[in-house]
Image: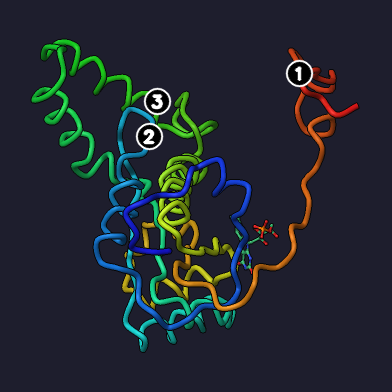
């Protein structure tokens, strides 16, 4: 029931969400789209650097072009909204860090000395990739993926609790997506999110690995026991 005042409980949305293949042409309500975008922008990121960028694609012709870049996936054309989530590995060098520190100065309890120390830490952390310039930080492509997927997933859940269906996508040619959307070379395309009103009944739940296979206690490989375990 998209556009409804009542939001679904997150726990219910988690239980019921499916990656939805087919969509009705009915648009996503503008207020709902705003909520979805704002939810993503409220996500946490390392040092609050927010290296994410999003291109919201609603225009049908543009969705058709994007579909070609997304390996022909029909949901890109069918869904009324496709959010293309990107990451800018150099954004922190090109103004984002200054802006984050400016906002921190405006809202936070810390003084200028603390902000300058944060600046030094960020530059030390992100300024060199392992094996390159002796930096301590992560590979920046991995780093932007890590941050962008938090915001992306937050948008997905907000769309789901508002009553929409969604489909996350990694099936796209990055260079083609960049060409269609005029995304700069230095920016990475991380994932696509289709949002809309699902057309058919959801496909059946594909099951998930049991906890015993993928969750360990205290160290890798040691099985975990938690209350309510299925024996
Ligand atoms: C990061 C990510 C990328 C995905 N890429 C695609 C995709 O390109 N095309 C597609 O049809 N499904 C894609 N999926 C959907 C998965 O296939 C789907 O989530 C999985 O099979 C489990 O099904 P369910 O989400 O319906 O429970 C992707 C899911 C994630 C999380």
**What is the C-alpha distance between the residues marked 3 and 2?**
14 Å
Q: Where, by quadrant of the figure, is residue 81 drawn?
A: bottom left
Residue bearing mark 2: 45
Does residue 121 sit above or below 213 in this rendering?
above
Ranked by sequence position, the earlier of labels 3 and 1 is 3
Q: Where, by quadrant of the figure, is residue 98 drawn?
A: top left
**What is the C-alpha distance between the residues marked 3 and 1?**
36 Å
* 143 and 227: which is toward the camera: 227
Does residue 205 sit above or below 67 in this rendering?
above
Q: Where, by quadrant of the figure, is residue 46 drawn?
A: top left
Residue bearing mark 1: 226
Residue 209 placed where, x, y %? Answer: 80, 42
Tell me the residue at 38%/34% (across/down): 45
Residue 93 placed where, x, y %? Answer: 26, 40
Residue 82 placed where, x, y %? Answer: 41, 70
Quarter placement of the N terminus? bottom left
Does residue 95 sit above or below 186 in this rendering?
above
Furthest-right residue in view?
231
Residue bearing mark 3: 125
């Amino acid at each position: 029931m998209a556009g409804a005042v009542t939001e679904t409980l997150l726990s219910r949305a988690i239980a019921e969400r499916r990656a939805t293949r087919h969509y009705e042409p009915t648009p996503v309500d503008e207020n709902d789209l705003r909520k979805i975008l704002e939810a993503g922008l409220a996500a946490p990121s390392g040092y609050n650097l927010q290296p994410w960028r999003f291109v919201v694609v609603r225009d049908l012709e543009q969705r058709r072009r994007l579909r070609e870049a997304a390996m022909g996936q029909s949901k890109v054309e069918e869904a009324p909204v496709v959010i293309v989530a990107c990451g800018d590995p150099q954004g922190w060098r090109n103004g984002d860090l200054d802006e984050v520190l400016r906002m921190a100065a405006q809202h936070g309890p810390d003084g200028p000395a603390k902000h300058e120390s944060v600046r030094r830490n960020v530059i030390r952390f992100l300024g060199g990739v392992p094996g390159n310039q002796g930096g301590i930080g992560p590979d920046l492509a991995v780093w932007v993926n890590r941050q962008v997927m938090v915001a992306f997933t937050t948008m997905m859940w907000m769309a789901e609790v508002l009553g929409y269906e969604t489909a996350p996508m990694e099936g796209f040619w990055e260079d083609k997506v960049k060409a269609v959307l005029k995304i700069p070379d230095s920016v990475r395309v991380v994932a696509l999110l289709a949002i809309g009103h699902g057309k058919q009944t959801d496909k059946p739940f594909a099951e998930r690995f049991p906890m015993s296979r993928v969750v360990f206690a205290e160290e890798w490989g040691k099985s975990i026991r938690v209350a309510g375990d299925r024996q």
